[in-house]
Image (cartoon, helix red, strand yellow):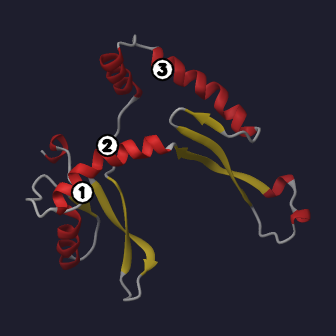
Amino acid sequence: MPVEAHPSPKVAENGERLLYMKSQSGLTKSLDDFETWFGDKYSLRKGEITRAFEAFLDAAPEWLAKGYRIETPFGSFAPKVRLKRQVTDPDDIYHDDIELEGVEFQPIKAFTKKLHSLLAPKASAMSENLNPAGCRITCSTWRKPCRSVFRNMVTQLLPVSPSIAA
């Protein structure tokens, strides 16, 4: 999986900024790609997946707005709410004090396990001191000595698919 390292606002004990990792930006798949993949793999007609997603998008916001958690075959969606102000007594909370922060997605264990299984063989092969060719990490702006040490550490753990490494 291609990843990017970015400095975070948090500072380590040694005074250096801590880094956080995220998947490489710009790597996206569209619903058309999804439709094509499903069509080839499961012989579905063009448009069936799109219609299923449209039906989900029609119902899900209404259910989430009512406070429901939505269970799907790949995980659950729930409204994520927060208080606009600091409150210590529950009796002091009013409707206007609560706002929607976003939607929380919690994948099912099988989904996460499958993802880990797709990454684990590559990571374990790299940890056996094999040649880390085909591994890449994109670093944001930080000093070169730190970059080379960090790159050597990460490239042994995170192989990149051959199509992206080219």
Please name the residue shown 39% across and 13% down the image. 44
Look at the numbered discs 3 and 1 and tell me whether their residues touch, using CB distance below 8 Å: no
Question: Looking at the image, is mark 3 or mark 1 earlier in the sequence?
Answer: 3
Q: Number of labelled discs?
A: 3
How far apart are the alpha carbons under marks 2 and 3? 21 Å
**Measured along the vertical axis of the image, is residue 25 above or below residue 148?**
above
Reading the image, the residue beneath label 1 is 158
Residue named by callout 3 = 50
Q: CA distance from mark 1 to mark 2?
A: 16 Å
Mark 1 Cα-neighbour bin, 10 Å: few <14, some 14–19, many ≥20: many
Find disc 2 in the rendering and name its residue.
27
Question: Residue 17's quadrant in the figure?
Answer: bottom left
Type of the residue with mark 1 = Leu
Q: Position of residue 81 (x, y in %)?
A: 70, 53
Mark 1, secondary structure of its residue: loop
Q: Is residue 156 left or right of residue 86?
A: left
Give x and y (percent) for residue 32.
37, 23
| Kind of residue indicated by mark 2 | Leu
* Residue 78 falls in image quadrant: top right
Give the residue drawn at x 66%, y 27%: 59
User: Is 1 on the left-hand or right-hand side of 69?
Assistant: left
Nearer to us of marks 1 and 2 is 1
Q: Earlier in the sequence, mark 1 or mark 2?
A: 2
Q: Secondary structure at mark 2?
A: loop
Instruction: Locate the C terminus and report the quarter of the image it occupies.
Output: top left
- N-terminal-most mark, 2 or 3: 2
